[in-house]
Amino acid sequence: MKNVFDGKRTGRVLGVLFCLTVLLWPATSQSQITVTTLRAPVNTLSISDLDFLNATTPKWLFTITMSSPQSVEVILTINLDVYLAAGETYVNAAKFISKPFMLDGTRTVTNLELGRGRGIPQRDVDGYIFNPQAKAAFQEIALPSGSMPAGTYRFTVDVTAGNATGQGIFEFNLTNPSSPVLLAPAAGETVVEELPLFEWQYDGPRATISIYEMLPGQRSLEEVASGTPQITATVSTRSFRYPVTGARPLMPGRTYVWHVKGLVGTAGGTDLELRSALRSFSVSTQRRSSLDWLLQELEDALPPSYKPVFDQIRAQDLSPSGTFRFNGSPISLADLLNALNDIRSSPESVSSVIVE
């Protein structure tokens, strides 16, 4: 028996196999790269935070998670575009390009793992570039103030394997809040309300209010504020109603000192505190017990469409009697205030209001 080699037939078979390999391999190995990102919850950044590859004490700024169903060689590119609140725009303000590395399944890295001597080094030539013009503009503001200029800092992350690219985008919206400015009670004011409303101006997302009682022998506001506060609360609003429960009541005839600290998120997970000036107020010996302020609280919590209801109440010179009902059931003043806070957070949930 002779073994006959059919060269034409074998060539056709190999040709078919080669075509299948060329057509199917990229579809299964390179087209499914995914990139997800997570950034630090910050309101301000320093020039060192932004120039993280050259920082001597870098802090966590962002996390990148890359995934591929098969082992592929990839290149990681991170590009920074800056849009300052003052109007200037810096496209390609900074760029990082890695050396090729293997991505086998899923890999997560942070900015602390990027750069020479770290998990993912930059390529040897132009692997990390910080635009000199942009850097000079940033330093002009950031070095004296300690904070980068306000604006949007957009990072675009590309993970490339051949012709396939997975992309993730995240932004830092820096506001660089200024210190809070106290509004009410006014300096030296004598309040008559049992539960006074504290108000302030602040352009940051969170703030902490602290209230101190002036003790006998204390002469300065700083001395009072160096003690233990009578109450401290962290809020995301620009006002605070003294609570019914959870704190010692304000005593008639006593003097109190208060301040507000604006909380600014920084890289590394810490908060920068911006303290307002100190302010004092006294509590009247003739307390107002009619709770007229509740009417204003309710009006502020409800949509503007209810304004005619409150206009009618004021026209008839009505005031709360001290007995409160919510949906027909008696509630305490503390519960009423909690209900008002719920209404204020989602006024669209109110379908009707009945005043008795």
Image: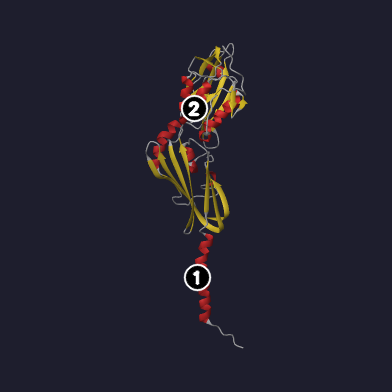
Q: Is residue 351 above or below residue 94?
A: above
Q: For marks 1 and 2, give the CA distance.
A: 71 Å
Residue at 46% across / 36% down in the picture?
A: 174
Front position in the image: 181 or 11? 181
The x and y percentages for residue 335 are 60, 27
The x and y percentages for residue 194 are 56, 17
Residue at 54% across / 82% down in the picture?
A: 6
Residue of label 1? 19
Q: Quadrant of residue 254?
A: top right
Which quadrant does the C terminus fall into? Answer: top right
- The answer to whether residue 299 of the structure is visible from this angle is yes
The x and y percentages for residue 129 are 43, 46
Q: Amino acid at mark 2?
A: Asp
Q: Earlier in the sequence, mark 1 or mark 2?
A: 1
The x and y percentages for residue 265 are 52, 34
| Dot 2 crowding, Cα within 10 Å, few <14, some 14–19, many 20+ | some
Label 2, secondary structure: give it.
helix
Question: In the figure, is residue 80 to the left or right of 286?
Answer: left
Q: Is residue 117 above or below residue 174?
A: below
Q: Which color scheme is applied?
A: secondary structure
Q: Amino acid at mark 1?
A: Cys
Front position in the image: 349 or 278? 349
Which quadrant does the N terminus fall into? Answer: bottom right
Residue at 45% across / 43% down in the picture?
A: 154
Front position in the image: 147 or 343? 343
Residue at 51% across / 71% down in the picture?
A: 18
Label 1, secondary structure: give it.
helix
Residue of label 2? 300
